[in-house]
Image (cartoon, grey):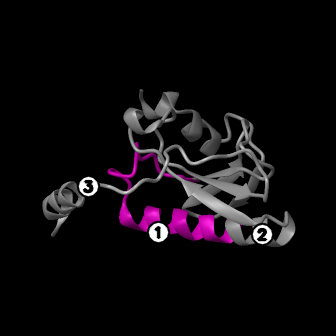
Amino acid sequence: MSEADCIFCRIVAGELPASIVEEDERTISFMDIAPATRGHALVIPRTHAVDLLSIGGEDLRAVIMACQRLAVRAKQRLQADGVNLVNSCGAAAWQTVFHFHVHVIPRYAGDPLKLPWTPTAGDPEAIAAAAKELAV
């Protein structure tokens, strides 16, 4: 998919409508059209980056700071009990729009959202082996 075909790039260009809640020189925040909860929004960089592995550091910092501002407003104005930040990097991780974005999902006591896995104790040897491979 080219940048010209990217739905989020088209929102940045003003070619597609969006309920924008904040924008600055690097980011745009807008409401998700298929919200998980009341107030679910997306934060994207204005500059196209496919995913977490390709976004530049300045844009990543700007997106995270915009996420924080939006999370604060969700707590204050929507009375959210908590907030999830969700990013999917790659199709195997459920990424469906290949323009880096972070979901800012207000959470409310009793809402229907669940973790996508059931936390259980891991194998200490497997954890140690993965840690060794990931270490700097």
In x, y percent, where is residue 100? 47, 47
Q: Earlier in the sequence, mark 3 or mark 1?
A: 1
Q: Name the residue under label 1.
A: 61
The Cα atoms of the two marked residues, 3 and 1, are separated by 34 Å
Read off the residue under disc 3.
123
Q: Which residue is drawn at 62% across and 58% down?
A: 84
Give the left or right position of residue 2, taking residue 17 as reference: left
- Badge 3 crowding class, 10 Å Cα cut-off, few under 14, some 14 to 19, many 20 or more, is few
For marks 2 and 3, give the one nearer the viewer.
3
- Residue 55 at x, y = what percent? 38, 54
Q: Check disc 1: other Cα within 10 Å, few if <14, some if 14-19, many if 20+.
A: some
Mark drawn on residue 75? 2
Q: What quarter of the picture does the C terminus occupy?
A: bottom left
Distance from Cα at disc 2 to Cα at disc 3: 37 Å
Camera-nearest label, 3 or 1:
3
**Label 2 CA crowd tier, 10 Å (few <14, some 14–19, many 20+):** some
Over which residues does the magenta segment extend? 44-70
Helix, strand, or loop for circle 1? helix
Give the mark, 2 or 3, whose residue is nearer the N terminus: 2
Residue type highlighted by circle 2: Lys
